[in-house]
Amino acid sequence: MPYEMIATLMFSTMMLMLLTGQRVFGAIGFVAVVAALLLWGDRGGYDLGFAAAMKLMKWYPLLTLPMFIFMGYVLSESKIADDLYRMFHVWMGGLRGGLAVGTIGLMVLISAMNGLSVAGMAIGATIALPELLKRGYDKRMVTGVIQAGSSLGILVPPSVVLVLYAMIARQPVGQLWLAGVIPGLMMAAMFIIYIVIRCRINPTLGPALAAEERDIPLPEKLRLLRAGLLPVIIFAVMMVPFVNGWTSLVESSAIGAMAAFLAAVFKGRMTRKVFENSVRNTLGITCMFMWIILAALAFGAVFDGLGAVKAIESLFTERLGLNPWMILILMQLSFILMGTFLDDTAMLVIVAPLYVPLVGALGFDLIWYGILYTITCQIAYMTPPFGYNLFLMRAMAPPEISIRDIYASITPFVLVMVFALAMVMIFPQIALWLPEYVYGD
């Protein structure tokens, strides 16, 4: 059987298993190991899985994964994130749409604390959504704000998804994180500009807070400002030494985890229940990511052995005659299509063995492509009919918000994201300037 046919059979089998509801790492790992056994016999098949496991265990930057996840859960479980929203509530409530703007700010800071979009969605739906609805904000506006803001969690550092991409693409995690800073803040600024303009045109969508709610003593305002800025201080304590080269990435992640833990202790919120929930959730998510990375490494090794990447490159460039930019756009469209039924991690481990080497062969920068992939995942998260964030919002939203409301709420924010994606594609330095400046490339 030709190698191209074997590669196609592997990919189709894996997709079929995923569509039947199998776990991502189980489907990918099973196909990889079975294909290796059939192609290279007992010894080759067993060695493949063992080599992938050893490669994973030797990858030192992977230690950042549990550290950042633990930091995010400590800040969330100890309710320090609640203080953050209260700060935005008081300081921005006088602006039309001010609480929605504050929610975007909350999401950016939650992203900097956790690196997962699910965390931002959970905090936004439980803290911000009830407050916004109670104060007369349009339900479609606020559900769109929370979904769009939570998607920043996979772009703004420390993004867990970019750690996974770095492992598969063999790129420096630090450079990928820095590459996500300006696009992430740019996208957040675009969301805020849209909210302010929309609420100025139609004030009923986001009314300003009543004067009596905003009329609190200045000392109380300053106290809320100090409490709300605590997560920012933790982030700065973690990232400044890393950016200046004083600490390694792993050391900075440990500093962040310890700073979050000590902040919760000093505020008297580190109870046994908070600690247990934080550790339990950290362990569960870290193990899930490690299994997925292990399966992806095994799957990628089989694909490399088959020469599937060269075959696909030949198909696009020689047989179909497509130029590199057309191929890149087709890749992004395929991510959006897959995002209707898969999450970002599953999309990455399924296509990374094919796309990442192909992107390099076409002459594109892999750091830049990592940011394109991440923004495209954000768009895919919110694309009907089966966008990942759409169903998360439906599960967390109150009964008065229907699935139709949720679908309608995301259209303007998706358009903003598409515009941001186009900007980063046309002007790669939006993503590449900061890592080049810091690392001197």
Image (cartoon, rainbow, N blue to C red):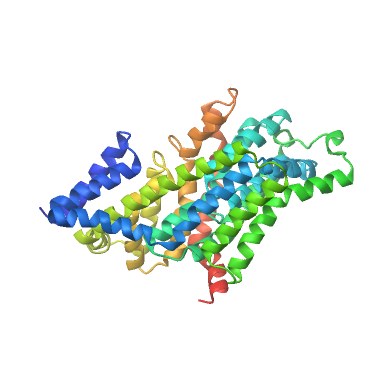
- 420 or 439: nearer the viewer: 439
- Residue lying furthest top: 399
- 295 or 210: nearer the viewer: 295
- 79 or 130: nearer the viewer: 79
**What residue lies at 79% left-to-right and 42% top-to-bottom?**
90
Determine whether 216 is above or below 436 in the image. Answer: above
Q: Would you say residue 396 is visible in this rendering?
A: yes
Q: Is residue 1 left or right of residue 437?
A: left
- Residue lying furthest right: 217
**What residue lies at 72% left-to-right and 48% top-to-bottom?**
266
Q: Is residue 40 left or right of residue 28?
A: left
Determine whether 249 is above or below 148 in the image. Answer: below
Q: Would you say residue 148 is visible in this rendering?
A: no
Q: Position of residue 102 (x, y in %)?
A: 70, 44
Determine whether 218 is above or below 235 in the image. Answer: above
Q: Is residue 26 left or right of residue 432?
A: left
